[in-house]
Image (spheres, rainbow, N blue to C red):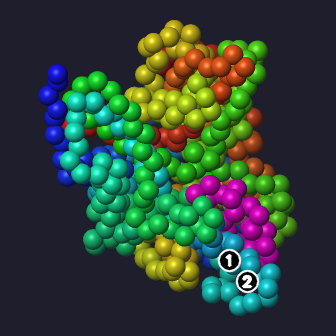
C-alpha cells in the first residue's frame, strides 16, 4: 500500500516531529512490552529513585501481553491492550526517556500534553489482529518481571509492524479528528 | 416417568476444551461476513484499511492456527441442562477442567487474576458459568471467551421508569459514544432490559451469543430499537478502530424481561469485533 512511512527504532525526537496523526507507519527494530503491573512497578522505582530493570532512554513501549508461543513459534498472538489504563504512568515514563508508545484507544489530556512536551509519539496498533502482528515478530525474550506471566516485560525484534499515528508532537489527535470528519445524520442501512 | 440419561463428565471436559480452542482461532462466519459487508460500504480510507486487516487476520489465525486476538478472554460458559440428564461426576469441575485444558493445549493466554493482589491464577480458571435447567435430556453448552477491553466499556444502570424507550435508546448510544475507540470497534452491543440488576447483565451477555446482526424475533419493539440504535451508532463517525467511518457497530442485540414497577434496569455489554462464541449440544 502507498503512503506508508517506514520507520526504524530507536524513534528519535526528529522522527516524532515528522509524524502526523493519521499517518500509516510500518515500524521495524527493537521495542519492549509492558502494561498495567509493569508500569506500576517501574513508576514506583522511579519515584523511589531506584535502578530500573530496563533502560528506558529512547525506548518504544508496546502495551501488550502475548499468548504463549506454540511449538516452533517465536511468539504467540500479540496485540495492543487499551492504553488509558497506562495514562497515570505514561508522563513519568516519557520523562524517564520513553519516546514511543504503542497501544489502542484514547489518551488523557495529561498524556497528550506530555507527548507535545517531550516530543514523543503515540502509535495505534489495531486491536484484534494479533495473529497478523505475530508474524511481524522475529525475536522475543522476557527481560524483566518474569513473575508477571503474560504481563512480563519482553524485548521484541519486529519487522513492519502496521501502526497508525494517533497523537503527535503538534498536539493532534486522530480519534477526535476522524470522528468529527465522519459523523453524519443517521440514515438507515441494510442489515 | 421419563428415563434419565447418563452423561459422563469426561464428555463435558472434552466438549468445553474443544469449543474454546476453536472459538479462539476461528472467527465465526456470521462475524466474518458482517465485516466483509461493512468493508464494501466503508468510505473512510483508514476505516477500510482496518477492516481489511481484520479480514486478513482471520485468515492467518485459522490457517496457522493462532488465536485471533492475544486477549483470549475470561471464559464465559452458558449451560442449558436438560432436567432428564444425570451427570456422573462433578459438573462444575468438569467445565473448569475443560477450560484449563483448552487454555493449556491451545496456547491461549491466561488472563485471570486475583482482583486485589493481581496474581494470575495460572490456568485461566475460574470460568464464569451460567447454568439453567430446561426440559429434555440434552445439554447445550455455549462457550464465549470474553475480552477485557470491551468488557471495561460496559455497565449496568438503573434508569428511571419514565425514561421509557427513548431514554433507553439514548443511553445505549451514549455508552457507545463514550467508549469511542477503546473497545476495538466495530463492536457488537449487547443490551439487557428489565429484570433485576443481575438479570439485566445476564440478558445483555446472552444477547451477545446471538449470531451477529440477527434481530430479536420475540418482540417487534425490540427489533425496531435494535435497528434504530444501530443506525444512530453508525452515524457517530467513530468507525473501525476509532479511525473514523460508518462501521462503528455490526449489530445491537437487545433482550428484555419484565421488571419491578419502581425500576428500569439496563445493562449495556460491549463486545469487540472478535466476537467469539461456539456451541455444542450433548
Q: Residue furthest front?
A: B1
Spatial CA distance of label 2 from label 1 is: 6 Å
Q: Classify mark 1: residues with Cα within 10 Å, few (<14), some (14-19) or many (20+).
A: some
Determine which residue is flagged by label 1: A41
Residue at horizontal 74%, vertical 67%?
A90
Q: Where is residue B259 in the image (x, y as percent from the top left)?
A: 61, 20
Q: What stretch is highlighted in magenta?
A: A81-103
Q: Which residue is drawn at 63% across and 87% down?
A: A53
The reply to whether discs 2 and 1 touch (Cβ–Cβ < 8 Å) is yes
Quarter holding residue A73: bottom left
Q: Residue at x 71, y 47 (%)?
A: A174
Question: Which type of secondary structure does the marked residue at label 2 adopt?
Answer: helix
Magenta segment: does it hold A90?
yes
Foreground residue among B104 and B42: B104
Residue at numbered disc 2: A45
Query: How many numbered marks, from 0 up?
Result: 2
Q: In this view, does B174 lie to the left or right of A124?
A: right
Amino acid at each position: 500500500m502507498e503512503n506508508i512511512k517506514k520507520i526504524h527504532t530507536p524513534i528519535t525526537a526528529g522522527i516524532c516531529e515528522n509524524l502526523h496523526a493519521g499517518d500509516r507507519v510500518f515500524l521495524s527494530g527493537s521495542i519492549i512490552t509492558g502494561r498495567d503491573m509493569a508500569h506500576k512497578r517501574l513508576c514506583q522505582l522511579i519515584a523511589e529513585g531506584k535502578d530500573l530493570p530496563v533502560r528506558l532512554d529512547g525506548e518504544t513501549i508496546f502495551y501488550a501481553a502475548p499468548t504463549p508461543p506454540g511449538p516452533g513459534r517465536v511468539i504467540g498472538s500479540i496485540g495492543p491492550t487499551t492504553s488509558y489504563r497506562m495514562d497515570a504512568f505514561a508522563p513519568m515514563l516519557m520523562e524517564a526517556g520513553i519516546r514511543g508508545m504503542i497501544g489502542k484507544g484514547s489518551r488523557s489530556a495529561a498524556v497528550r500534553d506530555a507527548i507535545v512536551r517531550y516530543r514523543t509519539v503515540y502509535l495505534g496498533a489495531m486491536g484484534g489482529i494479533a495473529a497478523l502482528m505475530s508474524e511481524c515478530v522475529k525475536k522475543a525474550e522476557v527481560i524483566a518481571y518474569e513473575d508477571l506471566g503474560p504481563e512480563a516485560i519482553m524485548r521484541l525484534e519486529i519487522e513492519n509492524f502496521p501502526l497508525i499515528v494517533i497523537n503527535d508532537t503538534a498536539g493532534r489527535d486522530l480519534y477526535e479528528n476522524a470522528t468529527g470528519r465522519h459523523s453524519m445524520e443517521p440514515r438507515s442501512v441494510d442489515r | 416417568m421419563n428415563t434419565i440419561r447418563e452423561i459422563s463428565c469426561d464428555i463435558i471436559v472434552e466438549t468445553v476444551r474443544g469449543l474454546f480452542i476453536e472459538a479462539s482461532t476461528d472467527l465465526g462466519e456470521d462475524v466474518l461476513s458482517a465485516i466483509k459487508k461493512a468493508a464494501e460500504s466503508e468510505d473512510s480510507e483508514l476505516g477500510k484499511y482496518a477492516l481489511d486487516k481484520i479480514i486478513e487476520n482471520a485468515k492467518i489465525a485459522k490457517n496457522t492456527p493462532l488465536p485471533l486476538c492475544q486477549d483470549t478472554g475470561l471464559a464465559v460458559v452458558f449451560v442449558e441442562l436438560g432436567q432428564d440428564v444425570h451427570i456422573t461426576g462433578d459438573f462444575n469441575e468438569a467445565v473448569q477442567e475443560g477450560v484449563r485444558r483448552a487454555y493449556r493445549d491451545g496456547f491461549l493466554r491466561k488472563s485471570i487474576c486475583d482482583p486485589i493482589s493481581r496474581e494470575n491464577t495460572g490456568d485461566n480458571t475460574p470460568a464464569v458459568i451460567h447454568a439453567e435447567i430446561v426440559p429434555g435430556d440434552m445439554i447445550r453448552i455455549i462457550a464465549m471467551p470474553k475480552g477485557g477491553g470491551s468488557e471495561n466499556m460496559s455497565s449496568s444502570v438503573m434508569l428511571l421508569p419514565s425514561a421509557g424507550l427513548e431514554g433507553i435508546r439514548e443511553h445505549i448510544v451514549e455508552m457507545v459514544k463514550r467508549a469511542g475507540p477503546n473497545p476495538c470497534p466495530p463492536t457488537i452491543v449487547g443490551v439487557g432490559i428489565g429484570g433485576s440488576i443481575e438479570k439485566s447483565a445476564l440478558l445483555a451477555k446472552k444477547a451477545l451469543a446471538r449470531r451477529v446482526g440477527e434481530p430479536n424475533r420475540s418482540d417487534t419493539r425490540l427489533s425496531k430499537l435494535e435497528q434504530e440504535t444501530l443506525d444512530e451508532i453508525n452515524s457517530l463517525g467513530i468507525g473501525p478502530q476509532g479511525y473514523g467511518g460508518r462501521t462503528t457497530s455490526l449489530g445491537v442485540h437487545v433482550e428484555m424481561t419484565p421488571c419491578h414497577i419502581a425500576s428500569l434496569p439496563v445493562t449495556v455489554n460491549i463486545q469487540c469485533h472478535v466476537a467469539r462464541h461456539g456451541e455444542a449440544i450433548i
